[in-house]
Image: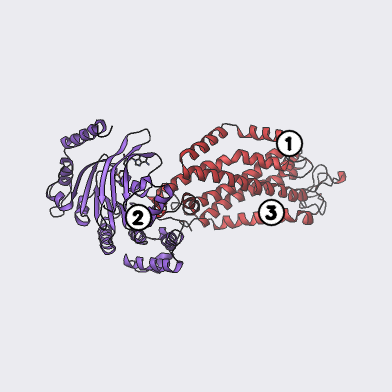
Amino acid sequence: MLDARVLDGRSMVRRRVGVRLWLSALWLGVLCLGALLAPWIAPHDPLAQDLFLGRMPPIWVAGAEPGYWLGTDSLGRDVLSRLLHGARVALLVALAAGSITCLIGATLGLLAGFLRGWVDLVISRLIDIWMAFPPILFSILLIAVLGPSLTSIIIAIVVIDWTRFARVVRAEAMAQGAMDYVASARVAGRGRVGTMLREILPNVLPTIVVLLTLEMGIAVIVEAILSFVNLSISTDDPTWGGMISEGRTSIHQAWWVLVFPLIALFLTVLAFSQLGEGLKDRFDPVLR
Amino acid sequence: MSFLSIRNLSVRLKNGPPLLRRVSLDVAAGEVRGLVGESGAGKSMIGKAVLGILPPSVQITEGEIFLDGTDLLRLPPKESRRRIGASCALIPQDPLTALNPSHRIGPQITDRLVDILGWTRANADARARDLLAEVQIADPDRVLRSYPHELSGGMRQRILIASAFAAEPKLIVADEPTTALDVTVQKQILRLIAGMQARHGTALLFVTHDLGVVSKVCQRLSVLYSGLVVEDSTVPEFFASPSHAYSAALLAATPKYTDPDAGLHPVPEAVVNAVRAEVAAFDRGPAHG
Ligand SMILES: Nc1ncnc2c1ncn2[C@@H]1O[C@H](COP(=O)(O)OP(=O)(O)O)[C@@H](O)[C@H]1O
Ligand SMILES: [Mg+2]
């Protein structure tokens, strides 16, 4: 006899994630607000250059220029304003790429894992073939073809990462599909789609939520990397990756140009993953 | 004709070995038939075939499954699903995986009545409460609001029994319903199933590997070895004089409640070899070709 708790492993996990969940939600909330309101609350035009104000340090360091809270870069652009505008791009990519990837990958994974048979055969083969491509090369190639833009970044992320969702959700749906409660539902006369949505999906949802938030974190990083190598949107528009790339060249003269976007990136990715873990436990009746 | 009549049912692994070998068995309305055999003999496979939940990796190669006179295997899938849902239910083996961890108990019992059989919500709720009382659950309202993980194994099995009887099925397949439970709980659950079956007059296909259980609950039994039915008798006949050497050995191997100190006699090797030879002969024989 197999123990349900072993099969699904959830009741072994008991964590107090309250604090981390709330801190993550707080950071992401502040970030979202900042991004939404950037045009109104950013103290300066993120693109305005002022060569007389180049490489001003943050406000608490000697020699700072009042009004430039986090200092300026080598062209005299305000770091805080650029961070806020960069957050718009980061969050937009996270949201769009994350949810589209999730929708496509989770749907295919659910179908393959629950319906089995030829559906599974086709989807599994597709995943295997897909995963044979090296992802970074694949994305650079894709963007080279599509041309650098926000849309092509999102497409690149979806195209590369849907397999992550599909694989995990497929395995989970398969495990749930073998449970007796699914057999009972079928005997009672619930159709395939009904069984999938009502019986399987709620039990796979916690996993999907974790994957979704992780994916949002990954999307932020990927966007940053692509901006870093100048494959993102036009170089004028501020992005965290672009800022990191520019900051790298003047790390010794103006560390703040590099460090602040790095911190923002780090906190955001961390917050997404912690949010996922926390939400999973909230979603899951066994852990609740 | 019996309510359930399985005729010459053969099932095999796709491109693999046979799992059921021309199985025939009947369950009359209101009757309890025990289905006995060692683990892997194909007992669950028979139950799954009847309920239309065979795994996709196996296929039915011949035979009929008559439910109330109609061959399920000749019906369009939708129609056979509908008939099975309307007149059959399952009491599964493992109460831990047989309830959906994401839903409360109440909806798990009532949603099927409402969504599939068209009951009103109020009727279904009242029915669920009555059933939980009938399976001797002390606090039905609290239990209906609980999630499965908040309840003990015995409690969950009671719920599954209640749920199986919810739509007054004509036939219930109970697949080793007490195997996963503590010995102390097993007897209560067994008595509960027997009582419910008698009160509701439900036909029962009772899968077990425990002949002691068969003697208490069943009127007839089939003994299965490697997908081959080697014995089909009434319970008194069987316990007086089993008709097949293998089932006689199985009976001898069962500890007697009247005399628990009497040593266990494992099925002798000669008997196992004989029944294996019988299976092999069947696979070669003209009856199969
Ligand atoms: N999903 C499956 N796929 C392939 N073979 C299976 C599957 N389930 C059971 N079997 C095989 O079918 C045979 C009968 O299994 P089962 O009916 O579960 O036995 P029992 O219930 O009598 O213990 C066994 O040999 C088992 O290995
Ligand atoms: Mg079994």
Q: Are marks 1 and 2 in contact (CB under 8 Å)?
A: no
With respect to residue B278, does B151 lie above or below? below
- In the rendered structure, the colour chosen for chain A is red
| Alpha carbons under labels 1 and 3: distance apart | 28 Å
Q: Relative to B109, does residue B63 appear above or below in the rendering?
A: above
Label 2: how many residues lie within 10 Å, few (<14), some (14-19) or many (20+)? many
The percent position of residue B218, horizontal first and vertical second, equals: 22, 55
Q: Colour of chain B?
A: purple
Disc 2 marks a residue whose amino acid type is: Cys
**Element marked by disc 2:** strand
Question: The disc numbered 1 marks a residue on which chain?
Answer: A
Crowd tier of the residue under label 3, counting other residues whose Cα lies within 10 Å: few below 14, some 14–19, many 20 or above: some
Residue A23 in the image, given as x and y percentages of width and height: 61, 56
| Spatial separation of the CA atoms under disc 1 and disc 2 | 60 Å
Q: Is mark 1 within 8 Å of ligand 1?
A: no
Residue placed under numbered mark 2 in the picture: B88
What is the three-letter code of the residue carrying label 3? Leu
Which of the two marks, 1 or 3, is nearer to us in this view?
1
Give the percent coordinates (x, y) of residue A109.
52, 43
> Is any atom of residue B98 visible in this view?
no
Mark 3 CB lies closer than 8 A to ligand 1: no
Residue type at numbered disc 1: Gly
Of marks 1 and 2, the one in the foreground? 2
Q: Position of residue A182 (x, y in %)?
A: 42, 51
Quadrant for ligand 1?
top left
- Identify the mark nearer the N-term, 1 or 3: 3
Q: Nearer the viewer, residue B62 or B16?
A: B62
